[in-house]
Amino acid sequence: MVKTRAIAAEQGYVETIFGRRLYLPEIKASNLQRRQAAERTAINAPMQGSAADIIKRAMISVDEWLRGSDLDTRMTMQVHDELVLEVPEARLDEVTKGVEIRMCAAAELSIPLVVEVGVGDNWDEAHWKILSVATETALSGFRDDVFATYQWNEEEAIAQMITKDS
């Protein structure tokens, strides 16, 4: 954290792991509260910004794959580190594997991105019942579609990467 503050004060900005910059004009403010707020932002922004960059990359990759397929699957929203999709039950295994591959490949870090899959009749159910890929076949055969949420803990991965590389 000390190193990040020093870099931010010297450069006037911090960067995500992909090089996206957040400028911090208040980092050298004479007002203590403004300077401390900028320092907190400098510490948080590389991790939060990198997490945002990773999910955006994953979302673009998944969207391109889905548009070029006949999987009859729609990405309905992104929530923080999750992509929420409407998936026909008959295509659940295929979509799960394809999304998992693309999300894991969204960034090359010093540690792997691990994807967890949740399946349910709605986002809330899928979000709270994260299932492993191996247990997805236990779903009821009576639903026409299911919602699937794909997430990983990229903030933890980025924190570990930053710690290992520092």
Image (spheres, helix red, strand yellow):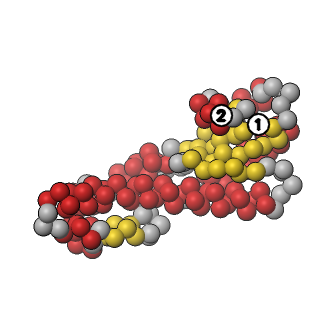
Q: Amino acid at mark 2?
A: Ala
The residue located at (44%, 59%) in the rendering is: 49
Q: Amino acid at mark 1?
A: Val
Answer few, some or many: residues within 10 Å of disc 1's Cα (few below 14, many 20 plus, some between 14 and 19). Answer: many
* Closest to the observer, 94 or 150: 150
Question: Could you give the CA–CA distance between mark 2 and mark 1, rounded to whole angstroms?
Answer: 9 Å
Left-right relation of 15 to 130:
left
The residue located at (44%, 45%) in the rendering is: 156
Answer few, some or many: residues within 10 Å of disc 2's Cα (few below 14, many 20 plus, some between 14 and 19). Answer: many
Which residue is label 2 attached to? Answer: 126
Q: Is residue 100 visible?
A: no
Which residue is label 1 attached to? Answer: 146
Q: Residue furthest bottom?
A: 11
Question: Residue 68 occupies which quadrant of the picture?
Answer: bottom right
Q: Are marks 2 and 1 in contact (CB under 8 Å)?
A: yes
Q: Is residue 63 above or below residue 13?
A: above
Say what secondary structure mark 2 lies in. helix
